[in-house]
Amino acid sequence: MRQPALTTTASFQALESHAVDAKAWQLRQLFAADAQRFPKLTVDAAGLFLDYSKNRLNADTIGLLLDLARERGVEAQRDAMLSGEKINLTEHRAVLHTALRMPRGKGLVVDGQDINADVHAVLDQMKDFTDRVRSGAWLGYSGKPITDIVNIGIGGSDLGPKMAVLALRSYAHPRLKMHFVSNVDGHDMDAALAQVDPETTLFIIASKTFVTAETMLNAGTARAWFLQSGTEEQLARHFVAVSTNTEAVKAFGIDPANMFPFWDWVGGRYSVWSAIGLAVALAVGFGYFSDFLAGAHAMDEHFREAPLEQNMPVLLAMIGFWNRQFLDAGSLSIAPYHQDLSRFAAYLQQLDMESNGKRVTRNGAAVDTPTCPVVWGECGTNAQHAYFQLLHQGTDIVPIDFIATLRATHDLPGHHDSLLANCFAQSEAFMTGKTADEVRADLSAQNLSADEIEALVPHKTFPGNRPSNTILMDQLTPTALGTLIALYEHKTFVQGVLWDVNSFDQWGVELGKVLAKNIHAELTGEIQPERHDSSTNGLIIMAKAAQHI
Ligand code: F6P
């Protein structure tokens, strides 16, 4: 259905009028005026808790935002996605990552194909394989159990598994050490190979298309490295593939029996739930991998069923939209107060920015509002000692998502309270700030002259009124991790619907790939770099010269 331009819709215009006053609101005053603000602006879903009260909005704002969600057809488009309609228009594909986490027997038939049966057949294959590797029944060519697993993939074939393996560190198998090689930069592969032994290493070649240049080069390097010790026949015990491209897997020399398939209706950045999650299942075991899927499914059910007023992904999306559109927030900072979520921001970068980093609508017209903010972040408390200065006192408004667990998965005394104290203190500080008078009062208690105090006041004043969300869960379990990722997936989907962009293609990564092929030929061959601009020509000549030194 052709959507009208966003700014022409009645609900957008109502929000615009509302924003005229709302932009001047002060969070301190909003809290002071309403003792019930916290219970009113918080929501529970599938074991997650979202506090969105520290945003510059009130219940009327939320009402208007949800009017916009309805006018843009969020509910109908959600149902279209979940039922397998081909909503990825530029690639004519369904978008069914939610089907990957449906329990067995929840029949989903699309284009005459029983998707649920297909998904569970691969899950069974994964269970059998992961059980054998983890138990030590699967042996390397010299008869020893596998000790190291190297996942070779990039983008969605790396970020999801790597993030989840790190996040679920506490659940990992003690014998299996996980490695991830993604970069075409040989230093990445070199560092991994330096740590492993061909007799006890299993390589997973993870690539939806099995043509991605980085992955194919890395896979070839790993194969050549293995063949320095093992034979072609022994490759089968050390190389498995995860892909949709059986022919290319065979051509690479991997036995199709060692291939874990998935389907074109799984987008790369939504693929950790498919066999691309094999590294996760190997690390934590199939039981916990099933919990991970179940956690995501619980969020899917919430997203499908909860009224928009209590629908966590919808609320998170609408608040993000409000901040982007009306507070001019060009970026979103992710601050997990959990060291095991150290790759979560990197994961969300692809999820959000590859999905919604678009400038035309599904019909090809230019969008008439800003779209996806830049997503970035680091774990607290490290982030506090790096860039929080700018977030507190810089000139830009950067909304923050704080993510924390109420309980730790370690038992070291003293740490978790300290961590949570920092997390809550930061969200409080961003909200309240510190006025000039409060700074003066503090400084007066010290032995300073009036001039010294006045000189310091502007530096020590915090504007505050800076928006944040806080997402809490009990512990970072496999289930909770699945739920958290699915929350952000659906948030991304809803924002894509608002902006009317296709959240499921990624044409923007193509141009660089093509140009890199041309330049590679110039770097490695005799072709002279004359066809480019003077900068690119110059850089290529420098690199060619250096290689001959
Ligand atoms: O280049 C972007 C991209 O297509 C991502 O969307 C994808 O996750 C990544 O490349 C890897 O693709 P593949 O799994 O096919 O190797």
Image (tube, grey):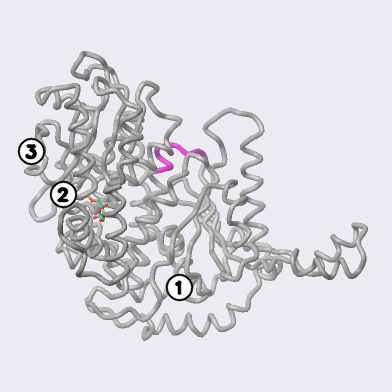
- Taking 535 as reference, is 98 above or below it? above
The quarter of the image holding the N terminus is bottom left
Distance in Å between CA atoms under marks 3 and 1:
51 Å
Question: How far is the residue under mark 2 from the one under mark 3?
Answer: 13 Å
Write down the quadrant of residue 70 in the picture: bottom left
- For disc 1, the marked residue is 65
Q: Residue at x 40, y 75 (%)?
A: 370
Q: Circle 2 sits on which residue?
A: 211
Tell me which segment is drawn in magenta: 475-481
Amino acid type, mark 1: Leu
Disc 2/disc 1 C-alpha distance (Å)? 42 Å
Q: Secondary structure at mark 3?
A: helix
The outermost residue toward the top is 143
Q: Nearer the viewer, residue 477 or 170?
A: 170
Residue 352: image quadrant is bottom left
Question: Crowdedness of circle 2 by 10 Å Cα count: few (<14), some, many (20+)?
Answer: few
Q: Residue at x 68, y 69 (%)?
A: 463
Q: Is residue 207 magenta?
A: no
Amino acid on which disc 2 is placed: Val
Label 2 vs 1, first from the N-terminus: 1
Q: Earlier in the sequence, mark 2 or mark 3?
A: 2
Q: Is mark 2 within 8 Å of ligand 1?
A: yes
In the displayed structure, would residue 144 be above or below residue 298? above
Please tell me whether mark 1 sits on a helix, a strand or a loop.
helix
- Residue at horizontal 51%, vertical 44%? 473
**Residue 102, image x and y in percent?**
26, 45
- Tell me where residue 134 appears, x and y as whole percent: 29, 22
Residue that badge 3 annotates:
250
Residue at 42% across / 81% down in the picture? 12
Residue 462 appears at what percent x and percent y? 70, 65
Q: Which amino acid, mark 3?
A: Lys
Q: Say which of marks 3 and 1 sits in front.
A: 3
